[in-house]
Amino acid sequence: MPIAKAQPGQTLLDPSNHTLIMIDHQSQMAFATKSIDAVTLRNNAALVAKAAKEFRVPTILTTVAEKSFSGPLFDEIKSVFPDESAIDRTTMNTWEDGRIAERVNAIGKDKIVLAGLWTSVCIVGPALSALDQGFQVYVIADACGDVSDEAHERAMERMVQQGARPMTSLQYLLELQRDWARGETYNETVATSIAHGGGYGLGLIYAKTMFGGGEGH
């Protein structure tokens, strides 16, 4: 008979147990993305970036052929990490670039969270490679996109079949907060939710404006 304990599960993310890698959120990659519209994709990328910044999650930014083809990283990400230089690659599989491996090893976390473009190429590659090497891999599905719904969905299925754990951008933020009594991150979590959390953010605005409501922290 299992015994219930008031503690989080080992597969839940917290700010100290993972590395976030944001991959190829660039204009040229977004032009051909059809599984998610550009406005939603940019919003979700901003939500993920702000969550990582707020909770001081070790974050690696990477681009592919930035100067010659794919263009700059989304401003929604660059503005959150103004002092962070993206690693520009030639490899479609981020994991095959030695500089990424060096950063991952230096950070030293066994959980890897991925988001980027395109799901079937630039996310599948590092996800399957990291899984093969013993890492736990999480994919923020709505901060990824592909050239078609089919391409995105089959890529997600392929990764999940190998053990990757899918999640959403808002889920990522709230999983890091997890307890509204965590006052040191409460205000920023609410602000990010209001700015990028869609209907949930509208609900927060309504509750706070009409009733002075809060989450009981």
Image (tube, rainbow, N blue to C red):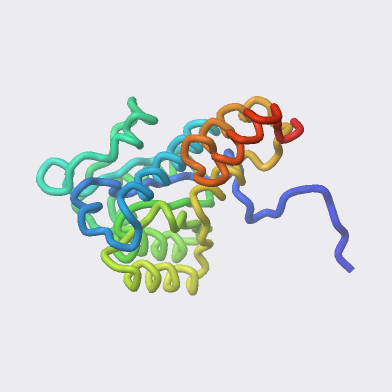
Q: Position of residue 23 (x, y in %)?
A: 33, 49
Left-right relation of 15 to 207 = left
- Residue 43 is situated, as x and y percent measured from the top left of the image, at 39, 43
Q: Give the quarter of the figure containing the C terminus.
A: top right
- Describe residue 185's horizontal placement relative to residue 2 as left or right: left
What count of labels does the image hold? Answer: 0
Q: Quadrant of residue 1?
A: bottom right
Name which quarter of the figure residue 148 lies in: bottom left
Q: Position of residue 197 (x, y in %)?
A: 51, 43
Q: Is residue 97 above or below residue 184?
A: below
Of residues 58 and 31, which is closer to you in this image?
31
Determine whether, in the image, residue 44 is placed left or right of residue 205.
Answer: left
Front in this rendered view, residue 56 or 104: 56
At horizontal 38% and vertical 41% (from top left) the residue drawn is 60
Q: Is any part of residue 102 visible from this angle?
A: yes
Residue at figure coordinates x 40%, y 46% from the top left: 21
